[in-house]
Amino acid sequence: MIRVLLAEDMHLIRAALTALLNLEPDISVVAEVTRGDEIVPAALAERPDVAILDIDLPVLDGISAAADLRERLPGCRVLVLTALGRPGQVRRALAAGIEAFLVKDAPGDRLADAVRRTHAGLRVLDPELVSTAMEYGESPLTQREATVLREAARGLSAEETASALHLSPGTVRNYLTAAIAKTGARNKIGAIRIARDAGWL
């Protein structure tokens, strides 16, 4: 029996995935969590063979949680689920050593098959996602530019961002200007959209 931990913050989706997987004769969902910081404690308690993690989880994202899980419970293999399949997320998942990456709108039988293949030590990656990820390349943003753009995406003003990051408002505006130029956007909103789509934030 393949023991599965499922991390998904949307209740209906989590319930549907659990029901779907529990119909399989060789798969059993032994733990369900709704936040990224709950993954490692639940995994240490239940010792699953495969952890299915949504990327966009509260408190700690799925890829960061996967890195923690690999360190604390290396025998547990990870299958990441995403609704969007952003190129940067695929690259982050690969860099974190994640064995499988699947979009949520995949047919139900593909999920069960992906769990079995992940458990067997095989990589399960959507070829189209990987191809798109390679096209986008690495982020052109520096760590500080990405941080400032991330704060702007949260709706913070330059002054609020400056206060939070212990910078001057002028320095924050300079980082925003650089981020806009590097993403090829016309303005801050465009830069945020482009960076998010590419998975650079």
Image: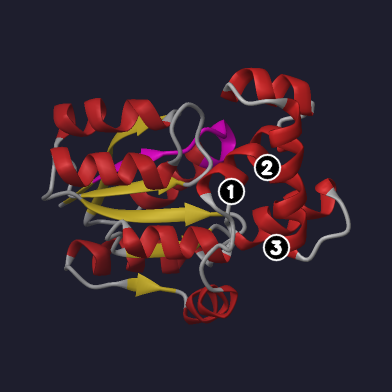
Q: Quadrant of residue 7?
A: top left
Residue at screen point 59% across, 48% down = 201
Q: Residue at x 70, y 53 (%)?
A: 179
- In the picture of the structure, the residue carrying the numbered disc 1 is 201
Q: Measured from the top left, where is residue 164 in percent x and y?
A: 61, 20
Q: Marks 1 and 2: in contact by CB < 8 Å?
A: yes
Q: Position of residue 195 (x, y in %)?
A: 67, 56
Label 1 element class: loop
- The one nearer the camera, 91 or 10, is 91
Residue topped by disc 3: 182
- Tag 3's secondary structure? helix
Q: Earlier in the sequence, mark 2 or mark 1?
A: 2
User: Where does the image place residue 117, in percent across and percent down from the top left?
Assistant: 26, 69
Residue 5 is a magenta residue: yes
The magenta segment? 4-13
- Tag 1: residue type? Leu
Residue 117 part of the magenta segment: no
Q: Is residue 127 above or below residue 186?
A: below
Q: Is residue 146 left or right of residue 97?
A: right
Q: Position of residue 189 (x, y in %)?
A: 83, 47
Classed neighbour count for the residue bearing mark 2: other residues with Cα under 10 Å, few (<14), some (14–19), many (≥20): many
Q: Residue furthest right?
A: 186
Amino acid type assigned to the residue bearing label 3 in the image: Lys
